[in-house]
Image (cartoon, rainbow, N blue to C red):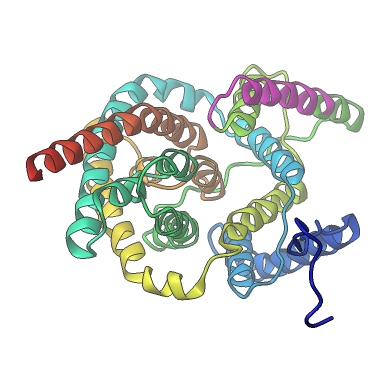
Amino acid sequence: MVGESKAPGLEISPPIMMRPSKLVLTRRLAETLVFAAAVGAAFGLPGLPAGWLSGAILFTAAAALAKRPVYVPQILASITFVVLGISLGAAVTPDVVDRIATWPVSMIVLALAMSCSTCAVAVYLNRVHGWDSMSSLFAAAPGALSQALALAADTSADLRSVAIVQSVRVLVLAVVLPLVIAGLGMAGAPPAPLPLPPLRESLGELALLVMVSTAAALIAYRVGLPGGLIIGAMLTSGMLHGTGVVRFNLPPAIIIASFVALGALIGSRFLGTDLIRLRQLFTASFGALLVGMTVAGAFAAATAWALSLNFADVLVAYAPGGLEAMTILAFALNLDPAFVGAHHLWRFLYVSVMMPVAVAYLARLRQVSEDKAE
């Protein structure tokens, strides 16, 4: 009652936010996947490049920005990565193995490309949009959202701005890059379908493929390998297919369902994003993407020419997107997912080592500047 005194020491706590029930979460998951699949089908069935993936991304991102409770549980994300890793491994052919000798050179060039791209984007954000040096650096890190945010949390960087610029980069690349590659006629030809052995043999091979690849994926994840679930499954599946132990891939329906789930997962990153803040960062996000892709494209063109590699393979490998998204994109475009995945794994490791060094260097410069000002 109004005017009623409180007991000494008794405080009224704010209401506790209850976690949604399993039924509510299941309903949210079903809604997310059904509509993501519907929009994915609208893109994929007419033959748009990577349509199932990009359609699902666009719907889920739009729904998240509209404050719909989109939901993709971690267990589904993990299963999706394993399934897609198994599918990627089936693309490993003797021709892919023959080209592995050129990978170290292109990886060295990738390291140089990443350094130049990061510097260019950081300078752009700092000089054109007035960002501070720390926020500019973390937003410029190519395809390294989790690493950037983890390191940025201990600095003065603007975490929300960094997260938005990094997320926009991944989303736009996953949706637009396939259209550009296909529009320029650089997408690969669909591979010949693997022959189907008799039913009994196929079931046995499927069981072996799934069990061994899943075990390898879990081991890779446990030891902390970046993208461990998808990389572990891809390497194992590649060895099984390359040695002839397994002669067929997962059914197309399962692969398509995985594209939809991955698209929903990427789009759900925008859940909770402030639309006003997103509009404010629109120019910075797309400008940073354009600068980064210009540098990456220039290095990709030079590398492809010097090493006689397919330009589309190198472009996707050098693109500043996420490891999983870019590797799956290569698979969907009938490119070389093993080449792309290996380079993005190298990119992840390189950024993991060099980012703390760059942060320490900037912090030292700031300290020296402050000391001089005093």
> Taken as a whole, is the magenta stretch helix, strand or loop?
helix
The magenta stretch spans residue 298: no
On screen, residue 137 versus residue 249, left or right, reads left
Q: Quadrant of residue 98?
A: top left
On screen, residue 206 versus residue 186, left or right, reads right
At a point 35% along the width and 40% down the height, the residue shown is 314
The magenta stretch spans residue 213: yes
Does residue 1 lie above or below 113 as drawn?
below
The magenta segment is: 207-226
Q: Quadrant of residue 231?
A: top right
Q: Residue 37: where, in percent of width, then height?
A: 72, 64
On screen, residue 78 versus residue 153, left or right, reads right
Choose between 267 and 231: the one closer to the eye: 267
Do we see residue 308 in this rendering?
no
The C terminus sits in image quarter: top left
At a point 37% along the width and 44% down the height, the residue shown is 142
Q: Residue 252: where, in percent of width, then height?
A: 73, 48
The N terminus sits in image quarter: bottom right
Do we see residue 263 in this rendering?
yes
Does residue 194 lie above or below 176 as drawn?
above
Choose between 314 and 16: the one closer to the eye: 16
How many marks overall?
0
At a point 28% along the width and 31% down the height, the residue shown is 360
Choose between 322 and 68: the one closer to the eye: 68
Q: Residue furthest left?
A: 372
Q: Residue 141: where, in percent of width, then height?
A: 35, 44
On screen, residue 267 versus residue 311, left or right, reads right
At a point 42% along the width and 45% down the height, the residue shown is 143
